[in-house]
């Protein structure tokens, strides 16, 4: 038996840092919107305890890959002794602030839960996922959401399902390094969900732009088309749009910039629609 499932990206439509816990983790208020664009994973049952992933991700050892870590976590938690051959079609830029690794982990948890017939609840899978990364639970639950705490307290939210252009200027940004920066603002006042939706700024943006001129440049360029901002800790920047025609036009302009300017040769972009329900959950419901 084999299962092919999507691992969608997310955007942080706003991101405020409201404090810091004693263990160093930051208290956040953020709005996650899921996208209809992402990686694809295929899970095939394997005999014995075999667990493999192809192809390998450049620069990531197999035992560090969040897909393998999620599979092993599931086996440890349940005592299950089944195997799987997993293949990955990677489209999402790594270190982009669009949650590629976290989404891969969530798709693995849900995919193997189905393939190995473990019957764990979304609640349990979200708790397991939180031990792999702060962004995993939102992908496990599969709803666009307002998040608080360190990102684990989720309230599902309906957002306009508009098109976005997402631009990755090149640099991979380390989430850990951004959160470790001494000059990161950490005292933004807590807001209600409705107030937060009216303050769509990202507290990481200023220091990320100061440390990465290429991201600063891409954000300034994209801002000429609309209210562009950084997602998560970057490096992707994005802009909500009113039509696909507009998005196609900006995509063409990005291609021109890449051809015309050597400092913009690294630019990569995609168009995606915002979604309220994850395509992963829609695909799993079809499987039954
Ligand atoms: C910034 C966001 O992308 C917003 O969606 C996430 O909160 C980050 O989630 P993530 O990439 O899954 O991050 P994790 O792998 O859990 O954490 C990476 C590192 O970021 C820091 N970190 C992360 C989340 C958080 N609320 N406070 C933190 O200080 C910690 O140093 C941690 O070691
Ligand atoms: N399957 C995976 N896909 C992507 N990255 C992975 C994976 N497994 C491990 N990683 C590691 O996780 C790091 C962060 O990757 P990811 O694509 O999740 O970043 P991100 O989009 O910035 O995430 P976030 O928005 O959750 O902070 C990568 O640089 C890589 O070292």
Image (cartoon, rainbow, N blue to C red):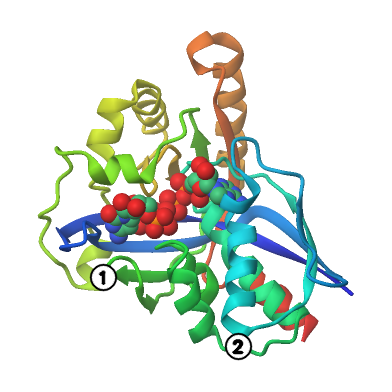
Ligand 1 quarter of the rendering:
bottom left
Which residue is under mark 1? Answer: 149
- Residue depicted at 77% across the width and 87% down the height: 288
Residue under pointer 2: 120
> What is the secondary structure assignment of the residue under circle 2?
loop
When the figure is inspected, residue 223 is found, relative to residue 213, above or below; the finding is below
Q: Is residue 7 above or below residue 115?
A: above
Q: CA distance from mark 2 to mark 1?
A: 24 Å
User: Which image quadrant is residue 94 in?
Assistant: top right
Would you say residue 13 is visible in this rendering? Answer: no
- Seen from the viewer's position, the closer of residues 226 and 288 is 288
Residue at 26% x, 70% y is: 149
Mark toward the viewer: 2 or 1: 2
Q: Secondary structure beneath disc 1? A: loop
- Indicate the position of residue 254 as horizontal and vertical percent values: 56, 25
> Horizontal and vertical percent for residue 99?
50, 53
Determine the residue positioned at 79% across, 81% down: 287
Disc 2 and disc 1 in contact, CB within 8 angstroms: no
Q: Is residue 67 above or below residue 225?
A: below
CB at disc 1 and ligand 1 closer than 8 Å: yes
Q: Quadrant of residue 142?
A: bottom right
202 vs 237, left or right, is left
Q: Is residue 199 left or right of residue 276?
A: left
Is there any visible trace of residue 91 in the rendered image? yes
């Amino acid at each position: 038996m084999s299962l092919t499932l999507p691992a969608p990206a997310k955007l942080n439509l706003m991101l405020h840092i409201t404090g810091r816990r004693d263990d160093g983790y930051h208290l956040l208020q953020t709005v996650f919107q899921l996208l209809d664009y992402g990686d694809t994973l295929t899970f095939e049952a394997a005999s014995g305890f075999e667990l493999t992933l192809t192809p390998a991700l450049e620069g990531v050892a197999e035992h560090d890959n969040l897909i393998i870590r999620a599979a092993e976590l599931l086996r440890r938690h349940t005592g299950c002794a089944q195997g799987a051959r997993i293949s990955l079609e990677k489209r999402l830029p790594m270190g982009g602030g669009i949650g590629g690794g976290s989404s891969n982990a969530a798709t693995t948890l849900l995919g193997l839960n189905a393939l190995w017939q473990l019957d764990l609840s979304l609640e349990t899978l979200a708790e397991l996922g939180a031990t792999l990364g702060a962004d995993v639970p939102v992908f496990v639950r599969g709803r666009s959401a307002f998040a608080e705490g360190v990102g684990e307290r989720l309230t599902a939210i309906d957002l306009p399902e508009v098109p976005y252009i997402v631009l990755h200027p090149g640099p991979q940004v380390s989430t850990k390094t951004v959160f470790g920066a001494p000059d990161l603002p950490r005292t933004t006042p807590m807001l209600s969900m409705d107030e937060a939706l009216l303050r769509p700024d990202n507290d990481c943006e200023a220091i990320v732009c100061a440390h990465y001129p290429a991201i600063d440049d891409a954000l300034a360029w994209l801002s000429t088309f609309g209210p562009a901002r950084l997602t998560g800790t970057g490096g992707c920047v994005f802009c909500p749009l009113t039509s696909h025609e507009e998005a196609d036009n900006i995509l063409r302009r990005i291609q021109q910039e890449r051809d015309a300017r050597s400092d913009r040769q690294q630019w990569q972009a995609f168009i995606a629609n915002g979604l309220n329900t994850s395509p992963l959950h829609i695909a799993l419901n079809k499987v039954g």
